[in-house]
Amino acid sequence: MNLVQAINRTLHEAMRADADVLVLGEDVGVNGGVFRATDGLYKEFGAERVIDTPLSETGIIGAAIGMSLYGLKPIAEIQFLDFIYPAFDQIVSELAKFRYRSGGQYPAHVVIRSPYGGGIKGGLYHSQSTEAYFCHTPGIKVVVPSTPADARGLLFSSIDDEDPVLFLEPKRIYRSITGEVPDAPERVPFGRARVVREGSDVSLFAYGAMVPPTADAAERLAGDGISAEVIDLRSLVPLDEPAVLASVEKTGRAVVVHEAPRFCGFGAELAAILAEKAFYSLKSPIARVTGFDTPFPYALENVYLPSVERILHAAKGAVRGS
Amino acid sequence: MFLIRELISGAYVAAPPVVMVEGARPTITPVTVEGEGLSPERLLEAYRLMVLARATDERCLSLQRQGRIGFYAPLMGQEAAQVGASWALRPEDWVFPAYRELAVALARGVSLRAIFDQLIGNAEDRIKGRQMPNHFGFRDVNFVVASSPIGTQITQAVGAAMAAQRRKHEIVTISFFGDGATSSNDFHAGLNLAGVYQCPTIFFCQNNQWAISLPRERQTRSATLAEKANAYGIPGIRIDGNDLRRVHAAVQEARARAVSGGGPTMIEAEVYRFGPHSTSDDPKRYRSDAELSAAKQRDPIDRLKMELRAAGRWTEDEDRALWEEVRAVVARTFEAAEKAPPLDPRSVFDDVFARLTPRLEEERAEYDALVRDGVLKS
């Protein structure tokens, strides 16, 4: 089963299990979503629970908040993360703050699913990784699966959770990554990183679509006699700090990989945490392999995106430089 | 039986002529409303409530100047619109307010003490001191917590109405907003969604003529705000917001239409903001005293008082006594609220999420250590 199929199946099961769960967004109903993530839901659950909305992201999220306050469990789809900005006000000013600003009287639990990331020839507006904007906002959780099983487990957890969740889907690997998915509705808890590969010389941190090239790099490093540990963060907020620190305390070296631009990207926070809490374990400077600090380019996306070669280069530099 | 056909879009107020495409206006099914408005006793009660709101406003402006509250956004001039609209609702209906809805909260049954606790941000404050004054919320009376961004509550009210529709609850949601909000994204998104899904919601616009310093005629080229609803296939009506009974009837009819499956309504209640936008604003910079004086000729409180007096139900003596009593109650209630204990500083970390994340636990421990070590005072 591939990643988008796992999401689709999980949505079906969650909607069967709880009549309060509903899906809304652009083209999610009759059309089944532009990536087919919601395919079949409309047929099974009807227009009342699979709501094709007018083209307004602020309308989608604002309405989802209202539904949630009233007691439903809306799952809103933003067709591409690049199109989320009309809803930014609703997300950061409203959704993320409802519980806090009401003194706990009005928690708002909306799950926002959104495909993100590059590598599909999507250019400026179908490629970006803007997770950092949301990670910077107190009150919303941010998770990113990289395998079908994690997509399933994290999506179940997102729907169960009592807080707003931004569920980012690495669209570049929607279909290219396949894997076993448990039949049981197993949850993957938030705030737990996954050790993709154990190692002792250098820690490679990645999430979403950057996990496969990072794992490939580790494999090649092994051929060069370097033992790399690969950690899939899965959950950016809350972050599994103990796993991050434990890995670097073991290896003494850290490379952070993400697609988003480097400046103030999630890697900056990770590097800061390591500098604050694992400084004396570090044998070499922390390296970041990220998108460049440019808008996301169309024709030259392979120049922009972190590649196996760049990850290898950074990891070798970390090991040899110490 | 009460029909308010005359209120239907643009027909009521003599406004500049509007060019409309023939047939573009949605058909409105007039709805029979039971109960026929407000009884004479109820009118008197409304008057008392409006006086309470006005006296509270006056007191709060002065308390802010004395530094006893940090900020205040007065509603003076909008009392009839707020009380009239609120009393056409039922307790099970949901209110999505902006930050100027003191009289709505009072009309929903919120105590003055609870309002003052919020203005002060003390330990009794229902929202735990999390927001500036006026941004209160009271779950027990379905008064959703307000925020500062303009118009965001509009789409939320639509979503809650969609949820009520799905649950087959016979309720309405109502969003309160001002003339400025009709330029916001969420106004248009919200009206559009509500038109598409025909959900039971009321868009209640208090057009108080000023969005801080921007006058109504610079906010939009539209002759009326209500006509914007027409473009979304929603009835838009424009009424005199200083007329308590007219407001009440309009909301009552909109409510009846909504719960009977007739869809949403937008109501533009024309009022005037007598006070500043907030205590941080000086309206002398942008509007004339003459304009304000003219607007005050239509003061909703004076208007209701004159009506009650003309009906022989109220005297000047009773009025003086009422004001005296209300002012004393307001002062006393505020002084009592001032005596409530302050918030626990450690509560700053609560309610970000349902439970403290490890990171927030760590930050709270960091704060505790700073207090313990004397770096910060607790």
Image (tube, grey):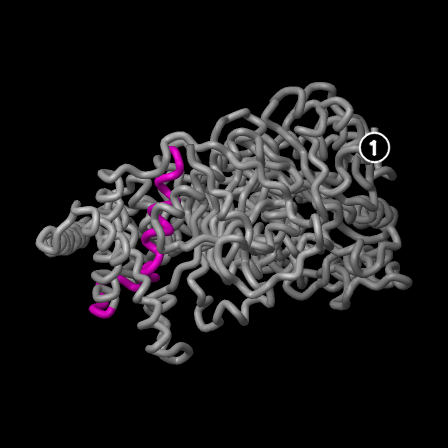
Let me know if residue A141 is in the magenta part. Answer: no
Q: Position of residue A32 (x, y in %)?
A: 80, 34
Mark 1 secondary-structure assignment: loop
Amino acid carrying label 1: it is: Asn
* Residue B156 in the image, given as x and y percentages of width and height: 54, 44
Residue A201 in the image: x percent, y percent?
Answer: 72, 50
Q: Which image quarter is the N terminus of chain B in?
A: top left
B75 sits left or right of A220 in the view: left
Q: A302 or B204: which is nearer to us?
A: B204
The reply to whether the magenta stretch includes residue B70 is: yes
Mark 1 sits on what residue?
A2
In this rendering, the answer to whether B335 lies above or below B195 is below
Q: Which residues are magenta?
A: B65-90
Q: Which quadrant of the figure has residue A67? A: top right
Residue B56 location, quadrant: bottom left
Instruction: Give the x, y percent position of residue B333.
Output: 16, 50
User: Residue drawn 62% across and 61% down?
Assistant: B18
Question: In the depicted view, which residue is nearer to us: B6 or B323?
Answer: B6
Observer-nearest residue: A172 or B64? B64
Magenta span: chief secondary structure: loop
Q: Quadrant of the C terminus of chain B?
A: bottom left
Q: Residue at x 57, y 53 (%)?
A: B187
Q: Residue furthest right?
A: A299
Left or right: where does residue A161 sit relative to residue B372? right
Residue nearest the viewer, comparing B361 with A165:
A165
Q: Is residue B95 left or right of residue A233?
A: left
Say whether residue A150 is visible.
yes
Q: How many marks?
A: 1
Task: Tell me the residue at 44%/67% (across/down).
Answer: B210
Q: Chain of mark 1?
A: A
